[in-house]
């Protein structure tokens, strides 16, 4: 993991966030978690300061095919900022998220921040997200946090699709919207999911995980 970076653009605390429940106890979205201006500043910060690496189109044995440009950074301060500007408030005010964590309590975000950029032809095939231990705090993760920095004005394709069963008969499709945050349960309760191929423009995503204490 690359060392801490500190000069992220300023992100503002949100007071009126609304949570949409797409699948109880499993998938939640929060529109306008970042403003358009925050998304654009983050993208220009990333493009100027962070070198993303293209993942090989040939996956390691047992891993899903993932083709995108990505980086994994360790940044406790940035994780704390994302938590305190609104994710904290969301997880604590959404009873299904609190209940799913029991007997533990959601307590922060993974300092492992990942940035993905998908250009046309790139995608992340079906997989499950594992529970991980945050190296900095020793806490375990329970939910994946994805924040889309681009949406339909910037791109086509790139939907995040969750399957209710392994046979993929029924799905929940999340179309990336600029500034929307998505929380989905992971580890033993993770649904099979994938990021569809981007067909036009650029999809940018920030990823962390909700940790429980
Ligand atoms: O890029 C997406 O829409 C999904 C990313 C994902 O599934 C992951 O980071 O595990
Ligand atoms: Fe995933």
Image (cartoon, rainbow, N blue to C red):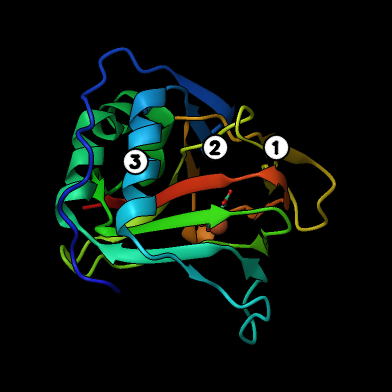
Which of disc 1 and disc 2 is earlier in sequence?
2
The label shown at residue 172 is 1
Name the disc covering residue 205, or none. none
Above or below for 138 versus 33: below
Q: Nearer the viewer, mark 3 or mark 1?
A: 3
Q: Nearer the viewer, residue 97 or 130?
A: 130
Q: Secondary structure at mark 3?
A: helix
Q: Position of residue 52 (x, y in %)?
A: 43, 65
Gap between marks 2 and 1 measured at Cα: 9 Å
Residue ID for mark 2: 27
State the image coordinates of residue 15 (x, y, percent, origin top left): 25, 15
Looking at the image, which is closer to me, 109 or 141?
109
Q: Earlier in the sequence, mark 3 or mark 1?
A: 3
| Disc 2 secondary structure class | strand
Q: Which residue is mark 3?
A: 42
| Residue at the image position 62 percent from the left and 52 percent from the top | 191
Q: Quadrant of residue 50?
A: bottom left
Crowding near the residue tagged with mark 2, few <14, some 14–19, many ≥20 C-alpha atoms within 10 Å: many
Q: Is mark 3 within 8 Å of ligand 1?
A: no
């Amino acid at each position: 993991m690359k060392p801490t970076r500190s000069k992220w653009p300023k992100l503002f605390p949100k007071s009126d966030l609304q949570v949409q429940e797409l699948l109880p106890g499993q998938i939640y979205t929060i529109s306008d978690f970042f403003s358009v201006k925050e998304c654009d500043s983050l993208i220009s910060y990333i493009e100027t300061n962070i070198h993303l690496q293209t993942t090989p189109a040939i996956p390691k044995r047992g891993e899903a095919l993932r083709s995108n440009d990505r980086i994994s950074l360790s940044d406790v301060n940035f994780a704390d900022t994302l938590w305190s500007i609104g994710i904290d408030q969301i997880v604590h005010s959404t009873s299904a998220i609190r209940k799913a964590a029991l007997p533990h309590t959601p307590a922060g975000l993974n300092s492992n921040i990942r940035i993905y950029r998908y250009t046309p032809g790139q995608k992340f095939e079906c997989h499950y997200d594992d529970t991980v231990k945050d190296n900095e705090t020793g806490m375990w993760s329970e939910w994946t946090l994805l924040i889309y920095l681009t949406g339909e004005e910037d791109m086509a394709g790139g939907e995040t699709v969750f399957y209710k069963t392994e046979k993929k008969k029924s799905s929940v499709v999340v179309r990336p919207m600029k500034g929307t945050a998505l929380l989905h349960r992971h580890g033993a309760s993770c649904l099979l999911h994938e990021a569809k191929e981007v067909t036009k423009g650029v999809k940018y995503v920030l990823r962390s995980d909700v940790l429980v204490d």
